[in-house]
Image: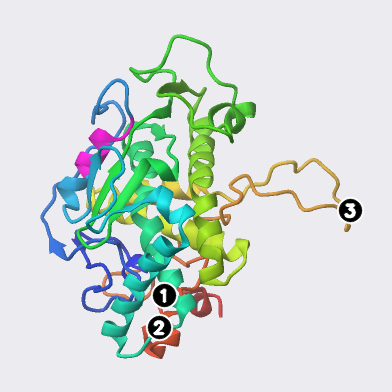
């Protein structure tokens, strides 16, 4: 059973060294146990880190309940074990070094080499899992969505550190940082706030409502992850649909886990289910047998967050059916995750 496919608990597990009863692709953190109190996370009671940035307050909250994953607001770093996001997507050698880290851990854990594509898939998960929290946690705690590019972040896997360079962000009209100018129409949100040629300048971008903010979060994540998945694709050896399913799993599992540590597991489940709801756009279009199937509103992410009815205490059944399979069972047959679609949909 994998740590990322089980109900969140206050005990996190190690990078590549999940705790007892867990599988290989658990949270990208170092082993620790911490007591935590129920967190009040409704926007307006937690406070925003500053009036001009998204994330600092949320990242501090994360550090209080998950000290092994440390996020600092700073320019990206390189050298001494740091991997800059820009290098990951631009230098194949940097990507291969990240994957080799997981290949070495897999050999130590299972006593046999991981298939190269399996090591790459685990490396992708362990990159996206913590990095996605840079987007989802400010949305969850502050109702702000950072607009980040790979060049804005760096990580050091060995120590569980991340740096992020805050810049532009989306917010709601009642946010203290909301500019007094016009609100961005939801219909033009992705193009308006995420230009393809350059990152938006620093500052707040106001969107009209919660639905538009959720759409902005999906767009921001998709913009960030597209070059990351393109870089991983030759190593993972799977198509775009599977890669986006893997990304969806990492995004959902990261915030679900963090929400559990914050005492907000049920709210995290509810909001993630709504974020990736399988509704479709263009439903009033052609409906004949040859009609093109309308894309889900959450595309390119896999529709549905995959949550099931909560398992009873002590049950080995997962509370979530994953959208993808990590293939770790190829190294050890009994290591298959409880939430694996090969089990839950078999």
* Residue under pointer 1: 119
* Residue under pointer 2: 114
State how far apart marks 2 and 1 are (Cα): 6 Å
Number of residue marks: 3
**Residue 50, position as x, y percentages in the image:** 25, 24
Q: Tell me the residue at 52%/70% (across/down).
A: 236
Dots 2, 1 in contact, CB < 8 A: yes
Q: Tell me the residue at 35%/18% (across/down).
A: 177
Q: Tell me the residue at 41%/34% (across/down).
A: 145
**Residue 133, position as x, y percentages in the image:** 35, 48
* Magenta residues, dominant SS class: helix
Which element carries disc 1, helix, strand or loop? helix
Which element carries disc 2, helix, strand or loop? loop
Q: Tell me the residue at 57%/72% (across/down).
A: 237
Q: Which residues are magenta?
A: 54-61
Which element carries disc 3, helix, strand or loop? loop
Which is in the foreground here, disc 1 or disc 3?
1
**Residue 131, position as x, y percentages in the image:** 36, 50
For marks 2 and 1 on the same chain, the one whose residue lies earlier in the sequence? 2
* Residue under pointer 3: 288
Q: Which mark is residue 48?
A: none
Q: Residues within 10 Å of mark 1 (few under 14, many from 20)?
A: many
Q: Residues within 10 Å of mark 3 (few under 14, many from 20)?
A: few
Q: How is the image coloured?
A: rainbow
- From the viewer's perspective, is 18 left or right of 318? left
């Amino acid at each position: 059973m994998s740590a990322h496919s089980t109900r969140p608990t206050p005990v996190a597990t190690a990078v590549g060294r999940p705790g007892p009863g867990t599988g290989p692709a658990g949270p990208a953190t170092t082993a620790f146990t911490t007591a935590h109190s129920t967190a009040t996370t409704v926007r307006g009671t937690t406070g925003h880190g500053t009036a001009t940035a998204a994330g600092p307050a949320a990242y501090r909250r994360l550090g209080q309940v998950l000290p092994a994953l440390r996020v600092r607001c700073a320019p990206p770093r390189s050298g001494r074990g740091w991997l800059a996001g820009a290098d990951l997507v631009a230098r194949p050698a940097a990507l291969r070094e990240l994957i080799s880290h997981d290949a070495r851990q897999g050999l130590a854990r299972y006593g046999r080499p991981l298939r190269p594509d399996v090591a790459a898939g685990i490396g992708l998960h362990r990159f996206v899992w913590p990095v996605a929290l840079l987007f989802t946690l400010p949305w969850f705690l502050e109702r702000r969505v950072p607009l980040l590019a790979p060049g804005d972040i760096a990580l050091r896997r060995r120590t569980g550190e991340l740096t992020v360079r805050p810049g532009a962000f989306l917010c709601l009209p009642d946010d203290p940082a909301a500019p007094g100018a016009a609100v961005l129409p939801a219909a033009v949100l992705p193009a308006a706030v995420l230009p393809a040629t350059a990152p938006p300048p620093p500052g707040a971008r106001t969107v009209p409502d919660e639905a538009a903010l959720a759409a902005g979060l999906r767009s921001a994540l998709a913009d960030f992850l597209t070059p990351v998945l393109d870089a991983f694709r030759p190593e993972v050896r799977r198509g775009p649909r599977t890669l986006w399913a893997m990304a969806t799993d990492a995004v959902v599992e990261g915030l679900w886990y963090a929400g559990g540590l914050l005492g907000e597991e049920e709210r995290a489940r509810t909001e993630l289910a709504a974020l990736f709801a399988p509704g479709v756009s263009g439903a009033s279009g052609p409906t004949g047998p040859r009609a093109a199937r309308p894309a889900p509103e959450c595309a390119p992410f896999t529709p549905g967050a995959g949550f099931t009815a909560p398992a009873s205490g002590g049950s080995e059944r997962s509370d979530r059916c994953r959208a993808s399979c990590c293939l770790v069972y190829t190294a050890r047959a009994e290591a298959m995750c409880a939430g694996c679609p090969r089990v839950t949909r078999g």
